[in-house]
Each structure stands twice: as structure tokens, then as C-alpha cells.
Image: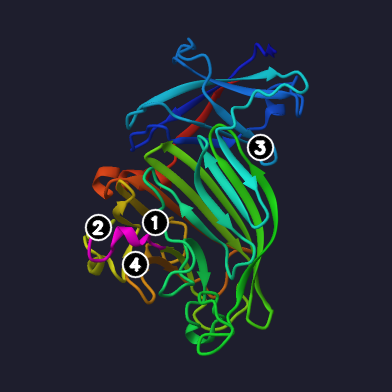
């Protein structure tokens, strides 16, 4: 293997939030910096350096997604207001030589995707043979924080998922319930069409999927492109970042979108466990039907305490979102309505599920929300 001599220097600024293992991600076009770049045979190598260019580590694990020209790695400890420097070089890789440590894997099976990190299942994305795709299990370091299919009550409350229409408020299509018959049916469905891209590597696993949302009679309400990225800050801090990008919903009524989690029964919410939101309200009844930037629910899972925080991105319409439940307090959702007319051709909804050990204060949920909405600042300062 042969290294290039030229390097691109990148300065990373923490901004107002302290960082540790945060994602650094930005568009990087190798041909603009390295004339010898060969698609498919060249690799980008990242290493942390001092401000004067002296190496601090031989190599920082990184991941380059060629289809979207995005380079990603994770920070070291970086206090608020401070900066770090990295050098990017190219590495010529002989044919058939594997240089990637595929720590984060994504396996395409018949009816689901299996996402593993460090050879352990983080989540399964179930997309065929279902009324709407969902994530289950969604594992913390002690077990799943959401329940699977077949619950005694509301069996359509399964895992973590995006629903549309609620119970058909205002006449909207119902892609919340799973019934063919009245009073809530015939219900619509969210149907998988194809996977555009599956990505795995040392930093994250990601998939991009095309779907359609249809009414009970089969009429298409909207098309969606869904992007999901799974990564760990450490085994006790796990993230699932989800972007739903849809066409204008051709439907009547409230047209509500709900990002939903049906919690694991072992967490015994609302009677036990710890529930808290970004506004400092504590307790399941206190956070119900309140607007907040995030809401966290934690309780016993397996041999310890795991929690699930739902993050609402500031770019979403009607932010901060309306947190609450439909039917049962063991479920939590974020509610958003699209504007009557879109400013662009698509509606974009962004959410994050943060799976962690302990309760919200112990897991620094507020801090990680700030890190989610305020990524590190990136500056290419030298070529």
C-alpha cells in the first residue's frame, strides 16, 4: 500500500458543546484535492495532528461513502470552545485487499434488515409483511427498550416507527391502526419499494429506502425516501438517526405524522421508571401532551436500567413537537402536521432515538440533544 504525500488539513471546532466520540461528517470530493485519486482503488486515511502538523495518532478510523461523497469519523475528547486538527491523505489499495474494519454491519434478509455493531444486534428493521415498517428490537446494553409484535393490547403498537393519520382525524387516511374493518379500517399502509443504498463500515451503518404511503383502497398518498443511520458514541450510548422525506401528502383532514415508540413492558411505565422532558417536567402525566424538544423514558430492562430518548429536530414543522400518547401511557409519540403548502417539493422530518444506560440525568440527554442539533463545525484550512 502506498500513501500520498499531500494532505488536506481539517480544523474541527467544538462550538458551545463539549464533545466525545461525536460524529464529524461533511461532503468531501477527493478529486478536488488528490489528482491521483482512483475510484474504487483509493482510500481516504484520517489522522489527528497538532496545530503545527505533528501526528498525534497514526490513524483515526473513518468512513467514506462514495455515492454521496461524505466523509465521517468520530472526535476524541474536545472541550467546548476548543478545536482539533486532522490530516486527510489517500492510500492506494491493491485490488482485492480489504482495508475496512466493518464494525457496523447491515445484513439484508428476506423481510428485514439486521443491524449489528461489534457483532451484537442493535436493531432489526422489519419492512415486509407489515402494515408499516418498524424497528424491533431496539437494544440498549441490557436489552430492548421497545416491545415486539403480538402484545395483548393494541397489537399494532410495535417497536419504533413512523405512523400517519392517527385514527383518521378530519378524514385523513389511517396508517396507524392495522385493521381492514370499521371503525378504524380499512386502514392504509406504508409499503417498502426498494433499498437505494445499504452502507456499513467502522463508524456507522446506514440504509436509504423508497416507500409509498397508501390509503385503504390503494390510492397513493405520498412517496417517501427514508434515511436511517445507526452509530454508537460508546456501548452505553447508541443512536438511530432517521430522516423521512416525503412528497406533499395528497389527503384530507389533519394529515398528522407521528414518530412513535411502544415501550418494553419491563420498564413498567407509567407506574415506575423515570420520565423527563426538555422543559424539566418529570413524570408520565406531567410530560403528556406537552411541547418539548426531547422526551426520555427509562426503566428496568434485563439486568439494569435502559432509557429511550426521542429527539425532535428544530427543522421540523411545528417544532418543538407535541409529545403524548394514543390509547396507552406505555407509548410515546411526537406529533407533527405538514404545512398546507410546502416551501419546496418535499416535506422533511428528522428524528433521533437515543438508547442509553440509566435515566435522563445520568445519560446527559440534554447534552446529547444539543450535540445532535449542533454538530461540530468543520473548516478545511489547508490543501
Q: Crowdedness of circle 4 by 10 Å Cα count: few (<14), some, many (20+)?
A: many
Label located before the other in sequence (3 or 2): 3
Spatial separation of the CA atoms under disc 4 and disc 1: 14 Å
Left/right placement of residue 377 relative to residue 330 reads right
Horizontal placement of 36 versus 245: left or right? Answer: right
Of the residues under marks 4 and 3, which one precedes in the sequence? Answer: 3
Question: Image height check: is 24 above or below 130?
Answer: above
Q: Which residue is mark 3?
A: 69
At x 56% / y 50%, what residue is drawn? 228
Q: Are marks 3 and 1 in contact (CB under 8 Å)?
A: no
How far across and how far down the image is residue 334, in percent? 41, 65
**Helix or strand or loop: what does disc 1 sit on?**
strand
- Quadrant, the C terminus: top right
Q: Which residue position holds label 2?
A: 273
Question: Which of the labelled discs sits on residue 310, or is there none?
Answer: 1
Which of the marked residues, 4 or 1, is nearer the chain's N terminus? 1
Amino acid at each position: 500500500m502506498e500513501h500520498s504525500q499531500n494532505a488536506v488539513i481539517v480544523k474541527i471546532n467544538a462550538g458551545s458543546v463539549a464533545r466525545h466520540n461525536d460524529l464529524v461528517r461533511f461532503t468531501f470530493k477527493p478529486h478536488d484535492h488528490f489528482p491521483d485519486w482512483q475510484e474504487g482503488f483509493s482510500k481516504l486515511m484520517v489522522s489527528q495532528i497538532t496545530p503545527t502538523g505533528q501526528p498525534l495518532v497514526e490513524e483515526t478510523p473513518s468512513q467514506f461513502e462514495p455515492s454521496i461523497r461524505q466523509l465521517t469519523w468520530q472526535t476524541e475528547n474536545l472541550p467546548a470552545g476548543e478545536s482539533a486538527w486532522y490530516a486527510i491523505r489517500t492510500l492506494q489499495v491493491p485490488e482485492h485487499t480489504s482495508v475496512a474494519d466493518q464494525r457496523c454491519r447491515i445484513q439484508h434478509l428476506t423481510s428485514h434488515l439486521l443491524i449489528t455493531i461489534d457483532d451484537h444486534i442493535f436493531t432489526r428493521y422489519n419492512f415486509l409483511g407489515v402494515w408499516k415498517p418498524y424497528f424491533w428490537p431496539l437494544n440498549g446494553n441490557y436489552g430492548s427498550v421497545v416491545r415486539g409484535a403480538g402484545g395483548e393490547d393494541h397489537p399494532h403498537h410495535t417497536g419504533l416507527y413512523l405512523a400517519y393519520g392517527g385514527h383518521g382525524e378530519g378524514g385523513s387516511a389511517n396508517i396507524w391502526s392495522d385493521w381492514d374493518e370499521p371503525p378504524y379500517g380499512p386502514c392504509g399502509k406504508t409499503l417498502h419499494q426498494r433499498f437505494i443504498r445499504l452502507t456499513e463500515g467502522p463508524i456507522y451503518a446506514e440504509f436509504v429506502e423508497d416507500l409509498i404511503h397508501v390509503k385503504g383502497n390503494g390510492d397513493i398518498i405520498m412517496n417517501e425516501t427514508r434515511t436511517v443511520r445507526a452509530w454508537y458514541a460508546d456501548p452505553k450510548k447508541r443512536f438511530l438517526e432517521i430522516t423521512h422525506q416525503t412528497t406533499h401528502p395528497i389527503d384530507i383532514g389533519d394529515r398528522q405524522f407521528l414518530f412513535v415508540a411502544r415501550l418494553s413492558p419491563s420498564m413498567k411505565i407509567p407506574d415506575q421508571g423515570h420520565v423527563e422532558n426538555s422543559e424539566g417536567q418529570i413524570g408520565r402525566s406531567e410530560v403528556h401532551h406537552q411541547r418539548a424538544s426531547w422526551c426520555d423514558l427509562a426503566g428496568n430492562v434485563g439486568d439494569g436500567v435502559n432509557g429511550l430518548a426521542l429527539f425532535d429536530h428544530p427543522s421540523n414543522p411545528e417544532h418543538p413537537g407535541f409529545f403524548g400518547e394514543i390509547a396507552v401511557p406505555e407509548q410515546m409519540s411526537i406529533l407533527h402536521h405538514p404545512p398546507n403548502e410546502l416551501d419546496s417539493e418535499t416535506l422533511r422530518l428528522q428524528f433521533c432515538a437515543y438508547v442509553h444506560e440509566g435515566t435522563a440525568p445520568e445519560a446527559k440527554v440534554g447534552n446529547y440533544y444539543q450535540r445532535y442539533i449542533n454538530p461540530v463545525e468543520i473548516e478545511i484550512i489547508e490543501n
